[in-house]
Image (cartoon, rainbow, N blue to C red):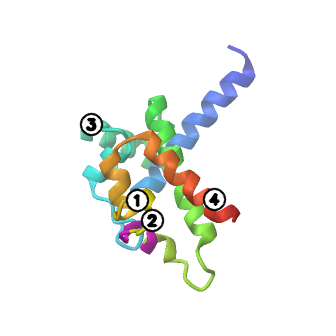
Amino acid sequence: MNTNSSDNSKRKLEQASAALRWFQTMRNESEWGLSTSEQLRLLGGMEEREFIRVSELASERQNVKLSEDTFERLSLIVSIYKILKEIAPTNDLQAGVKWFSTPNKNDFFRGKSPKSYLVGADSVDAMKGVHRHLSSLRNG
């Protein structure tokens, strides 16, 4: 294995660990208020036992190996969160949190909150769609 590939693999393990630590904070009511079952669905149906195991490793700042699908989902969730923070008015940093949990009249969400839409859809395509939607809002 060449050094560049090894560096990329190590970086991906570090990113997965950091993203899982962040994802645990999304349980807080001041953030997205995700339940464990919602987190598991967003991660593609990961088994709760595995989720607890990798979350504990991440909280100990150990690198974590996730499946490609789980890593992609987690990356999209982090990106969605970042975009929401970017487009939130400077005087209302909780606007993204509110938006994520409030039913949306946009046809894309079919009257559901983005949170309900993503948890119910349980697909990478839905996450990519929300990401595209938010990116278009950010980019005007």
**Label 1 environment density (alpha carbons within 10 Å; few <14, some 14–19, many ≥20):** some
Among numbered discs 4 and 3, the one appearing first in the sequence: 3
**Label 3 environment density (alpha carbons within 10 Å; few <14, some 14–19, many ≥20):** few
Q: Are marks 4 and 2 in contact (CB under 8 Å)?
A: no
Q: Which quarter of the rendering shows the C terminus?
A: bottom right
Q: Report the side of 137 relative to 33 (left or right).
A: right
- Between circles 1 and 3, the one closer to the viewer is 1
Q: Are marks 2 and 1 in contact (CB under 8 Å)?
A: yes
| Vertical relation: 10 (above or below) 87 | above
Q: Which residue lies under the disc numbered 2?
A: 106
* Residue 15 quadrant: top right
Q: Which residue lies under the disc numbered 4?
A: 136
Q: Which residue lies under the disc numbered 1?
A: 109
Q: Amino acid at mark 1?
A: Phe
- Between circles 4 and 2, the one closer to the viewer is 2
Residue 99: say if magenta: yes
Q: Regarding mark 3 in the picture, which secondary structure is present there? A: loop
**Label 4 environment density (alpha carbons within 10 Å; few <14, some 14–19, many ≥20):** few
Among numbered discs 1 and 3, the one appearing first in the sequence: 3
